[in-house]
Image (cartoon, rainbow, N blue to C red):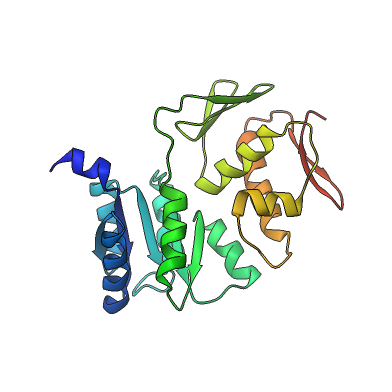
Amino acid sequence: MNTDTLDVHPRVLVIETDEQLAQHVSTDLRESGYEPTVVYDAIEGLKQVEDLQPALVVIDRMLAGESGLSLCSNLRSHGARMPVLLLMAKDSLEDRVACMEAGADDYFLKPYRSEDFLKLVRLYLHTENGNSEQLRFGDLVLDLASRRAIRNDRPIDLTMKEFELLKYLMEHPREVLTREQILENVWGYDFMGESNVIEVYIRYLRLKIEDEGEKRLIQTVRGVGYVLREA
């Protein structure tokens, strides 16, 4: 296999039961410069993630035999760190929270729209080559190249959205950030004014960076938003 080709054309694994939709997604990816691989069930999807180590995984929430949410959780429990996007039929708050709790980085909605999907893919596969910069706040370090946090020499794996949220907070230390600012700068699109999505992610970040009983760094400013500072 030509690894140079893989570097130029990032591999995207599509796990989709609907063959017609899967081929549509695959065609869009190929025409946009990506290298798609399509599988049609969760078991084969898990195997291909392990074998191919794709740059990004796309999963339909409704899969034959196993839900896309379960598959996403399974991938994360096996240590998969690449971005995972879920294709979902509904956009309720409960669906969004379920998506995040499963470890997905983001979602896009049916009916499938090529332009919206490819915009999301480009967002998650945009990388800054050679970026070795780190952000620091107290004993917390965020490595921008590996997208991993480190606290007291303890490495912390983050999903893509957790990384983006922590990065935004660390770029504005001691500055109170409103929920609207966080939505605009981290998610980049409107969640119809609901802040629960941010709260869910803040909770996940706190669990990870305070796992060893470390001091809380992400503080809640009631009625406003959040701030990165020592209490």
x and y percentages locating residue 16 in the rendered image: 33, 70
Residue 44 in sight here? no
**Count of all numbered marks drawn on residues in the image:** 0
Q: Residue at x 84, y 50 (%)?
A: 224
Q: Residue furthest left?
A: 1
Q: Nearer the viewer, residue 142 or 94?
A: 142
When asked about the image quadrant of residue 71, the answer is: bottom left
| Residue 75 falls left or right of residue 107 | left
Q: Residue at x 77, y 38 (%)?
A: 227
Q: Which of 221 and 111 is in front in this view?
A: 111
| Residue 20 falls left or right of residue 181 | left
x and y percentages locating residue 109 in the rendered image: 49, 72
When asked about the image quadrant of residue 81, the answer is: top left
Query: In this rendering, is residue 220 above or below 121?
Result: above
Query: In this rendering, is residue 9 above or below 135?
Result: below
x and y percentages locating residue 199 in the rendered image: 71, 53
When asked about the image quadrant of residue 70, the answer is: bottom left
Residue 126 in sight here? yes
Q: Which residue is drawn at 79% across and 35% down?
A: 175
Q: Nearer the viewer, residue 211 or 39?
A: 39
x and y percentages locating residue 168 in the rendered image: 64, 39
Query: In this rendering, is residue 6 above or below 187?
Result: above
Q: Quadrant of the C terminus?
A: top right
Q: In which quarter of the image is the N terminus?
A: top left
